[in-house]
Amino acid sequence: MKQKLLSVLMLAAAAHVSAQVTDAMIAGSAADTHSVLTWGMGTQGQRFSPLTTINTKNISKLVPAWSMSFGGEKQRGQESQPLVYNGKMFVTASYSRIFAIDVKTGQKLWKYEHRLPEGIMPCCDVVNRGAALYDNLVIFGTLDAQLVALDQNTGKVVWKEKVEDYSAGYSMSAAPLIAEGLLLTGVSGGEFGVVGRVDARDPKTGKLVWTRPVVEGHMGYKDGKENGITGTTNATWPGETWKTGGAATWLGGTYDAKTGLAYFGTGNPGPWNSHVRKGDNLYSASTVAIDVKTGKIVWHYQGTPNDAWDFDGVNEFITFDMDGKRVGAKADRNGFFYVNDATTGKLINAFPFVHGITWATGIDLTTGRPNFVDANRPGDPAAAGGDGKKGASVFAAPGFLGGKNQMPMAYSPKTQMFYVPTNEWGMDIWNEPISYKKGGAYLGAGFTIRPLYDDHIGSLRAYDPKTGKMAWEVKNNAPLWGGVLTTGGDLVFWGTPEGYLKAADAKTGKVLWQFQTGSGVVAPPITWSDGTDQYVSVVSGWGGAVPLWGGEVAKKVNMLEQGGSVWTFKLAK
């Protein structure tokens, strides 16, 4: 009897261990077709699934399996990418909420709703883009700049850590990244003069291991000890401007095990008025590659030195193989697509992926620097002859919402193409005098966004990263603000603000299927299999930055309805 009881206990313990998400599972997550363990569907962020059950020949039979509403009045923008593991889906929602859902039935298993204080200052809607899984935990960031780790089975809080002071403008909206047993996170708040950084923590306890600021002059720390200043103080920032330099790491990062590097994009420098911070303003508007073990920057590449247009540089850096090299690609908000050596950062290729770029004529492939059009930089309010209140206005394209914003692109190793959600718009922009005040908007600029074309703003485009040639595009009336998924079944999935989840042939761009979700889709789809059926899921809920900041564009889409739900599809029998 004792032996039988011991065997039962051992089996139970083994089952419990196997139910935990391990480092090995995360390392192999891109090839795991039964789970979705990371934002980006693998730490490299390719958003490619090798699944072929759903393909170009049978996509017309894709039908809803279930839908679950987030409920309540807290709708707003829903930008979350769900995670799937051990029969559960974990999906975050607006206002720092997270749900666990039965993947078979769509039944809500539990919900955690973070208690938010008065005075939070999210820049661009009360969104959350997803969570991370590790051990028996699901971990996500909140709008008051905290990290919360919950038990996957019960939703009970296991640990909670304050990351920063929300009253100074800090918040968190990105999905955390697990790499080499560490929880890597960034911060949001670039419009409030915060200082961007990347933190590494023990995911089981929340204890800080290292922190690396991404603005020159700030000290990094590891194990509680100084770990070297980032860059060289005042090398690219005049006076004390580095102390409120922005460069928020608000989209999170990717990781490549072959290089041992985590790649984080950094946001706009503060303030937007570039005349008060003459210099390149490192490491804003850049990709920074950080050694996960040491917490030090190995290389950086800056897309927009001395950014004057809020072009940011935070977009995802996706690693892949090209011509026998490990390289990485990024479609920057500034309108240029970059390919860099993933180990050294050396620029390999750069080309425009949107039309009508006004701020630069191109990228010098030798120096890596843009060829600026000086006349298209907003004027200095302090310039001689000015009234000191407003600098000369210029028209700039793309607008500050970017040729591509937060919506992640996808890469298919099968077609060797990137599928990029793009937007064609421009802005009138001018600079104004500005001084820093804790918790106050730190812009020093005014702007009006407007579309460039009558027939479309958004466009999903397929690009060859080697040649820079566009293979195909599918235009969309409203801006595209959700992400992309591609599969071994030669399909590309993406959503539109008009509410459709769409699927196209990855080789030709022919739209083969679409479904109306009831609200705008501003989130990336996922797919997985239970061994019998392949499923596709996407979160629906219109919002994000466009209706808040979009000017004439916002007026064009003001008829779109908010929502909050997650849809799951499979092939009809």
Image: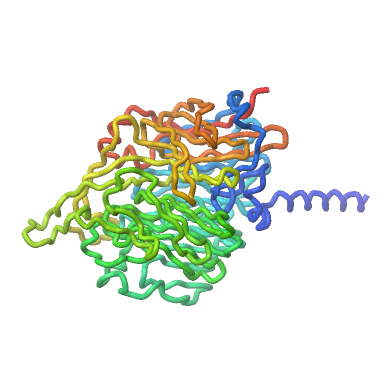
Q: Of residues 83 and 97, which is closer to you in this image?
A: 83
Where residue 365 appears, x then y in whole percent? 39, 61
Residue pictured at 44% horizontal, 42% vertical: 470
Where residue 242 appears, x then y in whole percent? 31, 68
Q: In which quarter of the image is residue 461?
A: top left
Task: Tell me, yes or no, if residue 461 can be seen here.
Answer: yes
Q: Of residues 241 and 147, which is closer to you in this image?
A: 241
Taking the image as shown, residue 297 lies to the left or right of residue 281, namely right
Where residue 410 appears, x then y in whole percent? 52, 45
Residue pictured at 21% horizontal, 46% vertical: 395
Q: How many labels does the image show?
A: 0
Taking the image as shown, residue 308 lies to the left or right of residue 316, namely left
Q: In which quarter of the image is residue 54?
A: top right
Residue pictured at 53% horizontal, 65% vertical: 343
Where residue 256 appears, x then y in whole percent? 57, 59
Task: Tell me, yes or no, if residue 96 can be seen here.
Answer: no
